[in-house]
Image (tube, coloured by chain):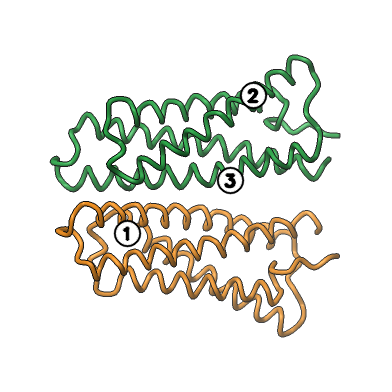
Chain colours: A green, B orange
Amino acid sequence: MEEVPGSVGTSGGFSLRLGQTLFSSASLLLMSLGVEFYSYTAFCYLVTIMGLVIPWSFTLALVDGYSVLVKCPVRQPGILLIIAAGDWVLSVLTLAAACSTASVVDLLLHSGGSYCPPKCCSRYQLSAAMAFLTWFLSLASALLNLWLLPSL
Amino acid sequence: MEEVPGSVGTSGGFSLRLGQTLFSSASLLLMSLGVEFYSYTAFCYLVTIMGLVIPWSFTLALVDGYSVLVKCPVRQPGILLIIAAGDWVLSVLTLAAACSTASVVDLLLHSGGSYCPPKCCSRYQLSAAMAFLTWFLSLASALLNLWLLPSL
């Protein structure tokens, strides 16, 4: 059986999961710390999705780290199918959240300064950028796991 | 070689392409006819993406219709790879456009009536819904073509 770099149970997969956890935590913190995010639907959605992505990525980072340490990767097709499906769903949801946040921030920036003090808006922008990075890493994980699936 | 229903060159694929063309045209028309869409970045983005999706889906609908009529489906791996990759890219872009439009419309609706007369806003909402339907059909095409690819 071939080894796909970046799939479940490899050091590449561990780095991808670690990156996802870091970027999604940064996005959540930038959005929620001291900023009144709950007045906009798109920002609430981003916070909800990041609250789903963080535990998912963190758990899989632990699994990958353990697999690398004991040199015994997960190879049950059922488990891999669940992981690949979860990755796909979360990657689509993350893209939706990132796009919504980015478009609302853009609208707030261009509708004049009354809605959004400059300091807050740059924090929202950074949060959207972090969400896009999370999406990118999550898509990479999903693609690599899907690639691994038929070889089992 | 097995036949995947809904992939390139089948009557299912033809229906999917026809649905994509219809929904994306409806979305473009609802957004652009008599409404000042160019003042919002998200709406301009939706119009751009729909302008890409319509010719793509229409061309592939013609190809599928021709294949069904002459009973000679396209089976060159190179061409199928290009179609599958194009479907994936357009489906991601359509999802991004639909989410951006939906979140901006939601923001305009809840920020008070000064920005958006009720008649315009319901048209924007319909346009976003049509974009989501386009995304759904486009994702189905992309998944079915990706499924067909390894069997060649």
Between label 3 and label 2, give the one nearer the viewer.
3
Q: Residue at x 47, y 30 (%)?
A: A24
- Are the residues tagged 1 and 2 within 8 Å (C-beta)? no
User: Looking at the rendering, which quadrant does residue A132 occupy?
Assistant: top left
Q: Position of residue A77 (x, y in %)?
A: 80, 39
Which amino acid does the dot numbered 1 rest on? Answer: Phe
Decide if residue A88 is on the left or right side of residue A44: right
Q: Residue at x 65, y 21 (%)?
A: A62
**Label 2 element class:** helix
The front one of B72 and A124 is A124
- Are the residues tagged 3 and 1 within 8 Å (C-beta)? no
**Label 3 element class:** helix
Question: Which residue is label 3 attached to?
Answer: A89
Spatial CA distance of label 3 from label 2 is 20 Å
Q: Position of residue B36 (x, y in %)?
A: 22, 66
User: Looking at the rendering, which quadrant does residue B113 occupy?
Assistant: bottom left
Q: Residue at x 61, y 24 (%)?
A: A15
Question: Which residue is label 1 attached to?
Answer: B43
Question: Which residue is label 2 attached to?
Answer: A14
